[in-house]
């Protein structure tokens, strides 16, 4: 663990992110973070102003890590292959960095420029991988929301022990992603009948 002399903002944020992953449902406190870093809580204020700033920094850290993972998965791929690879990379991130993933879920406010930049890196990658499908801007937003909901929902059920049937979960996830990709190709539900729309 770093001494007070070796403490940096980067170390604080990375440690906080790791702690969030270990206990995703637990509210992180500066007291617990200081204990993990083996420093006194006031030492943290030399690098961060308050807990809210720390949470925002963790969210920025998470957004850039997700963007890096998605970018690495898509390198050298295009079309369905890229979309499938990105979906698996997204699942790996949600599975292996559960606390960090939760930290990135809230949409950034316009005044949170660094967080906005991190979130836009992720969105821009997803938009680029969807470009070959000829979707309208609105359809791309629908598709990105569907992808996020699909991955988040699957992993949430998986981690909660919600899948008890004797079928391989990786096969089920691949089946789900292939259905998503097929629907993006077909684009048959861009508009629901009025009678099915939520009023």
Image (spheres, rainbow, N blue to C red):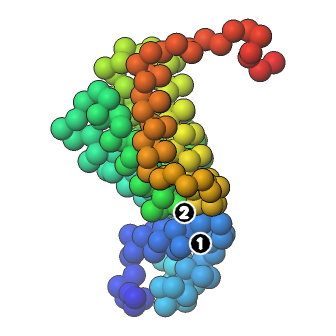
Residue at the (52%, 68%) spot, across then down:
21
Residue at the far top in the pictured view: 194
Q: Quadrant of the N terminus?
A: bottom left
Residue that mark 1 sits on: 23
Q: Is residue 185 visible?
A: yes
Lateral position of residue 107 relative to residue 175, left or right: right
Which quadrant would residue 184 be assigned to in this image? top left
The tag on residue 99 is 2
Q: Residue 53: x, y in percent?
A: 56, 62
Residue at the (37%, 26%) spot, across then down:
130
Q: Residue 168: x, y in percent?
A: 47, 53
- Above-or-below relation of 185 to 102: above
Query: Camera-side residue: 161 or 138?
Result: 161
Label located before the other in sequence (1 or 2): 1
Task: Check whether the beta carbons of the residues at disc 1 and disc 2 lie within 8 A of each other.
Answer: yes
Residue at the (38%, 87%) spot, across then down:
2
- Crowding at dot 1, Cα within 10 Å, few <14 / some 14-19 / many 20+, comes out as few
Residue at the far right in the pictured view: 199
Q: Is residue 117 visible?
A: no
């Amino acid at each position: 663990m770093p001494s007070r002399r070796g403490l940096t903002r980067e170390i604080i944020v990375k440690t906080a992110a790791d702690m969030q992953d270990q206990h995703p449902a637990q509210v992180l406190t500066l007291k617990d973070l200081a204990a993990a870093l083996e420093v006194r809580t006031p030492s943290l204020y030399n690098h961060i102003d308050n807990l809210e700033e720390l949470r925002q920094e963790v969210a920025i850290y998470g957004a850039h890590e997700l963007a890096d993972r998605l970018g690495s998965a898509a390198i050298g791929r295009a079309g369905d292959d890229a979309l499938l690879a990105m979906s698996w990379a997204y699942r790996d991130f949600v599975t292996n960095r559960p606390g960090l993933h939760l930290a990135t879920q809230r949409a950034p406010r316009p005044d949170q420029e660094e967080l906005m930049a991190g979130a836009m890196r992720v969105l821009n990658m997803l938009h680029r991988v969807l470009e070959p499908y000829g979707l309208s801007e609105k359809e791309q937003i629908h598709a990105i929301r569907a992808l996020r909901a699909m991955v988040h929902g699957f992993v949430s059920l998986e981690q909660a022990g919600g899948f008890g049937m004797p079928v391989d979960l990786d096969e089920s996830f691949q089946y789900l992603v292939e259905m998503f990709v097929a629907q993006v190709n077909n684009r048959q539900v861009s508009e629901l009948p009025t009678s099915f729309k939520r009023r």
